[in-house]
Image (spheres, grey):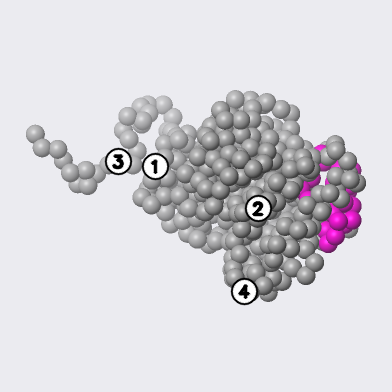
Amino acid sequence: MSTPNPSSVTQPLLPPPWEPTGGEPPVRIADVRAIQTAPDGIRLVIVKVETTQPGLYGLGCATFTQRPLAVVTAVEQYLKPFAVGRDPNDIEDLFQAAYVSSYWRSGPVLNNALSGLDMALWDIKGKLAGMPLYQLFGGRCRTSAALYAHASGEDFAAVEADARRLMGQGFRHVRCQVAVPGYATYGAQIAPKGGETGGAAPTPYHLALRQDPWDPAAYCRIVPKLFDHLRATLGEEVELLHDIHERVPPILAIDLAKRLEPHRLFFLEDPFAPEDNGYFPLLRQQTAIPIAMGELYVNQNDYVPLIKDRLIDFIRVHLSDIGGLTPARKLAAFCEFFGVRTAWHGPGDVSPVGHAANLHLDLAVPNFGIQESHFFKERTQAVFPGCPEIRDGAMWSNERPGLGIDLDEAEAAKYPYPDHPLNGAWPPVRQPDGTVVRP
């Protein structure tokens, strides 16, 4: 008996064995929409999955600020027809099927689109259960998620003052960045007086198209001096962090890590670009400074070797860039076996929906480390009722079912994407001779 050619066999979208018999009509996915909004100038993409049950819908974060329109196309032209008519309860099957449906998988555009669908399905699952999502992940391991905040300034005294301001608000973990005189510097905005962001790292919408040049050597000279000053003035109790942001040659990053080790950082973030992962064994041989890595990772092949070989201490992936909550839960469990703690990416270009997803994992996983903070401004809170609450240096859940956050579409429509010559893309950062530098 000959075996039929698989390409000639029509595969049903809804496998018959899963179809219920009798009773009430099953809940189905009725629509999948990508909603674009920028209440604080950041290009956010939210996916709303509506069901055939009146009033039942879920929200997911698909925010990729540098390529948001590509994500919108992937959601509405590819995932929507793939998902409509399916059972929203089948999260794992929908994730796996959607993941391979493009044949060439992974990448930030496809992963963000998939994340929007995935997070929204988990949101629906929590609402159907009548529980906050962390309960479906096994329940709370802690009452809140400890945060770190961003301090920066034009000189050492300004960074110290900004750090003290944040410490006065209850933050025990502070990331510190300082400007390099005459050069561009990542994360070194002059801190606003009385502002709520604490000199947060610049996001793409802050960046001018013409920038000062970047000098890796000048940066590597000034940073150890900054932490000499901060440890002498702030003392030993505060946990200090720093972000290299992959902007220096790997051998300079290794040298900088060795020079910062005496200052006992909570972690040093992103010493290498993903293309330079091969330098991690050498870094580990040279210094015991804790390393956080993962902001630019989009594929498990990027981070699995670093975790299993115990070459990093904190995993810092952007949840929507790896595909959402389904892969993030597995990643957290994998990290637990190797002593790696979570520190999910959480700046302003993670939507409030994404921050809520971060929080529910933070509360449920035993190997939680720290969470990056972002202060939601009034317009953002109006667009996203139920934003996670920040107080005393920690983020707190509101205990509503699902992700606990909503979206006011009328408010969201008031804030279209801002005009930008590059449509949200990052302008290049260059060395003094014009060479483009990796961000």
Q: Is residue 166 magenta?
A: yes
Amino acid on which the number 4 mark rests in the picture? Gly
Real-space CA distance between mark 1 and mark 4, rounded to the nearest whole angstrom: 44 Å
Residue 70 seen by the camera: yes
Q: Give the secondary structure at mark 1.
A: helix
- Up-down: is 434 above or below 306? below
Q: Are marks 1 and 4 in contact (CB under 8 Å)?
A: no
Amino acid bearing label 1: Ala
Q: Looking at numbered disc 3 in the image, what kind of residue is underneath it?
A: Pro
Q: At numbered mark 3, what does the secondary structure look like: helix, strand or loop? A: loop
The quadrant of the image that shows the N terminus is top left
Residue 65 placed where, x, y %? 60, 59
Tell me if residue 321 can be seen: no
Kindly check if marks 2 and 4 are in contact, taking CB atoms under 8 A apart as contact: no
Q: Is label 1 or label 4 in front?
A: 4
For the C terminus, which image quadrant?
bottom right
Counting residues from the N terminus, which is met first, the one under dot 3 or under dot 4?
Answer: 3
Mark 1 or mark 4: which comes first in sequence? 1
Residue 117 image point, x, y percent: 51, 45
Q: Which residues are magenta?
A: 153-176
Residue at 85% x, 38% y: name it.
236
Q: Residues within 10 Å of mark 2 (few under 14, many from 20)?
A: many
Which comes sooner in the sequence, label 2 or label 4? 2
Q: Which residue is mark 2?
A: 253
Gap in angstroms between the C-alphas marked 2 and 1 = 40 Å
Residue bearing mark 3 = 12
Give the amino acid type for the residue marked by disc 2 in the picture: Ala
For the residues marked 2 and 4, what is the alpha-carbon distance in whole angstroms? 21 Å
The answer to which of marks 2 and 3 sits earlier in the sequence is: 3
Foreground residue among 352 and 175: 175
